[in-house]
Amino acid sequence: MIKSGMVQTKETEAGRNRSDKLLACRLQSHGQAGSLSLRDLDLPILALATQGAGGDDEARLLALLECFAPVVFPFERRAKLRSFRRLVKEIFHCRPNLIVMEGTGIAGGLAVLLCRLLAGIPFVVSSGDAVGPWVARQRSFLGLLFGLYERLLCRWSAGYIGWTPYLAGRALSFGAPRAMTAAGWAPITSLPTQLAASRVRIRQELGIAPDDLVFGLIGSLAWTKRVGYCYGMELVGALARTNRANLKVVIVGEGEGRSRLEQAAGNRLGNSVILTGRVPRDRVPDYLSALDVASLPQSVDQVGSFRYTTKLSEYLAAGLPVVTGQIPLAYDLGNDWLWRLPGHAPWNQRYVQALSHLMDNLDTAGLRAKQQSVPHQLPLFDRAQQVKRVTAFLTDILQEKLSDASSGSDL
């Protein structure tokens, strides 16, 4: 009995210490800590990522919510209908004070909209894409329907967390009552000495000479049938137009577009075009170290112009200059460390021709100047600052809900 009591006491103390740390974290992030109480801050938050449990999106969300103790719903991306039913049941069971949803998958979105309508449970949406235009690119006949869905999510949310300020502004124009930006961060960073050692090792593994000029990218190779494109196709197409002997293209990732890239590479595959397939997350910096220039292909429209993409922070952490299109980030985040190419999309021939010209004519001095200008850590991609801002944002929403509840008004 004494032993059991001691264990219980230790567990109680550990729980109390955790609560104290969470409270301190939230108070530190909140500008008006005096208006909060323990009761206010200990009410539950339910968190879910519509891309699926255990994925990168869920990891991002839980990192942003580290100053809270959320109930995590394990969303099953491949069982959307079942996830919808289970999520609605879980929401009504635990009655969270707030739902925070990463992603805009329709099963999760319809569930939070339904619970908002029937039970008045507020939700916050975090997203890295403009939903309507993105779906329209895949299936044009669904564009209007998902555009309406996106507007409803914003209009009925308690707040919106955009991966870019452009998405936050879009949400506000759709009726979101408040919005903020959390742009993400490089999940793994390496010291310059580590990157230098990795560069030698990975280049040897891939058969790349020390003096080869390497353009590349890391990403999901999803095939967009409507425009005949996946990430990396611009690199393969541009390479085919060059005459440079020491030029290589490295594409890291997996997806249905890989077979299309293999076809496009032809007899260059395995020689000047290297497709590695998927690599473990902890080895991503190693493969980035083997590159000289990173490609960030985005269209200049309502899909690409709203994005940063999740890879930008990783490219910068690896010290890589970036080649991209004439999208907003290319002007807003700096000029010295990137190249802006003309053309409305990376599958546009004008864009591919400009990329080919860059590949053919980039010399050592020009590359070095770009590399030396790369900001290895932009404040925008600082994880600690994003956690602090999200904590303050959600705490304010919770405080407003409690104030509205005490006055009898609805959120």
Image: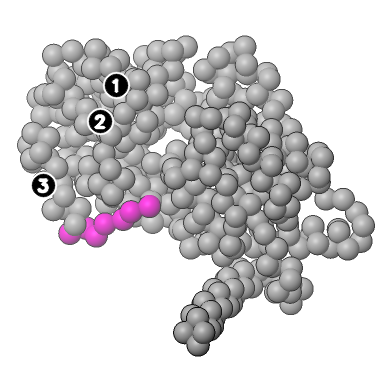
Above or below residue 142? Residue 10 is below
Residue at the (73%, 37%) spot, across then down? 113
In this figure, which residue is indicated by the disc labeled 1?
A: 258
Residue at the (28%, 24%) spot, across then down? 235
In this figure, which residue is indicated by the disc labeled 2?
A: 277
Mark 2, Cα crowd under 10 Å, few <14 / some 14-19 / many 20+, is: some
Mark 3, Cα crowd under 10 Å, few <14 / some 14-19 / many 20+, is: some
Say which quarter of the image contains residue 125: top right
Residue at the (49%, 29%) spot, across then down? 78
- At label 2, the amino acid type is Gly
Say which quarter of the image contains residue 80: top right
Q: Position of residue 75 (x, y in %)?
A: 54, 40
In this figure, which residue is indicated by the disc labeled 3?
A: 200
Q: Nearer the viewer, residue 47 or 65?
A: 47
Secondary structure at badge 2 equals: strand
Q: Residue furthest bottom?
A: 2
Q: Is residue 157 magenta?
A: no
Left or right for 18, reference 156? left
Q: Position of residue 400 (x, y in %)?
A: 79, 59
Magenta segment's dominant SS is loop
Residue depth check, mark 2 versus mark 3: number of the one nearer the observer: 2
Say whether residue 173 is visible.
no
Mark 1, Cα crowd under 10 Å, few <14 / some 14-19 / many 20+, is: many
- At label 3, the amino acid type is Val
Q: Position of residue 126 (x, y in %)?
A: 59, 44
